Every structure is written in C-alpha cells, then in structure tokens.
Amino acid sequence: MARPRSFDPDEALDLARDVFWQKGFQGTSLDDITAATGLAKPSLYAAFGDKNALFLTVLERYHARIVAKAEQIINDGPSPREAIGRWLTGFVPFCSGVKGKRGCLSVNTSADGASMQKEVRKQVEGFNRRLEELLRARLRADRSQFSDGFDPDAVAHTIMAVYTGLMVLAKDAPDPARVRATLDQALKLLA
C-alpha cells in the first residue's frame, strides 16, 4: 500500500480503513496499520488513540459517508420507488463481482466478532437504524402514492434486510445480474 508523504489524517484513516476491511478488526495488528499508514506507533497513538479508538473513527467515517450519500439519493426524486430504486441499484457494484468480494465494512465487522465490543455494536446498530429511518421517512412522506394496505415501517425494514443480506452475500462475489434481480423483487414492495 502507498505510504503518505506527510501526515494527512484523512489519508491515514483511509489507509487504516483498507487494512481493517481486508483483515477484519480482529485480524489487524498495530504493525499492519503502521505499515499501511507509514506512521510510527507513537504518532498513531497521538493522532488516533489505540487500535479500538482508531477503528471506531474509521467505522464512524465509513458510516457517515454511506448515510450522507443515501440521504441525498433517497430524498431526491418525485417518487420513493424511483429514489429508493436508485439507491439500491447504486450499491450493486459493492455487493457483486470482484469489487463486491470484500463486502461491507460494517457487515464484516459484525461477522468478525468486533461487534461484541459495546461501542462498535452501538455504531453498527446506529448506522443500520439511520438508513432504515431514511427509508421509513421517505415512505411515510409519500404514503399517498401507495395502496391502503401499504406499511411504510415494514417495507423500510424489509428493504434494510435485503440490503444487509446482499452485503453478507457479497463475499461470494455474486453475478451483478442476480443481485439486480433480487433488488427488482424487493422494489415490487413499492408498487
């Protein structure tokens, strides 16, 4: 991995994120992080704290980027079906094929046991809750576009279950067409 020429916290966090993503929280050592970032352990501690604190910062940043992008897409457009459809299809490359093989950092974190730590679990749960709240708010706001029996809360939760499930399956590098077919089925909930 490339080493930063001078200390750039954002670059160091991105490099650390890549190591955590590749090796998982449990499998990542401080030596791995110092090798990737080019920071000596004292500098790493001074900038980010211990491995746990660094990981929490990386995870928070990762979640914030995804939520900001989701908020932008889900709240845009004339219909929730079109907006949510764009959001879902936008992550097809991240849960299929070679690029998707590394999976989702948040899902991987839960799978590798890091979520046993209270603060990590709290962050992952908060991330999932924020995404579901975005979906729920959009579906509730445009409730009149759906049939009488439409349940925005249940549909938002189902879409999150599909999203999370696809991110779990991403490690198997499924064919993008298969992922799109799954999303097409999920979008039928918005008909």
Image: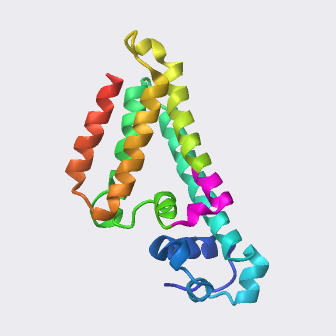
Q: Is residue 104 left or right of residue 64?
A: left
Q: Position of residue 46 (x, y in %)?
A: 79, 80
Pick the front one: 42 or 10:
42
Q: How is the image coloured?
A: rainbow
Q: In the rendered view, tell whether residue 74 sits above or below residue 94.
A: above
Which residue appears at 36% of the width and 36% of the height? 85
Going 61% across and 74% down the picture, which residue do you hit?
Answer: 11
Q: Nearer the viewer, residue 48 or 80?
A: 48
| Secondary structure, magenta segment, majority class | helix
On the image, the x and y values in percent for residue 97 come to 27, 62
Give how far across and how far down residue 62 sits, in percent.
57, 59
Q: How many marks?
A: 0
| Residue sitting at x 38%, y 56% | 168
Say which of 114 and 132 sits in front.
114
Q: Is residue 173 left or right of residue 109?
A: left
Q: Is residue 180 magenta?
A: no
Which of the 4 image quarters holds residue 162? top left
Magenta stretch, residue numbers = 113-124
- Screen quadrant of the C terminus: top left
Quarter location, residue 37: bottom right
Give me the residue at 73% from left, 74% from top. 48
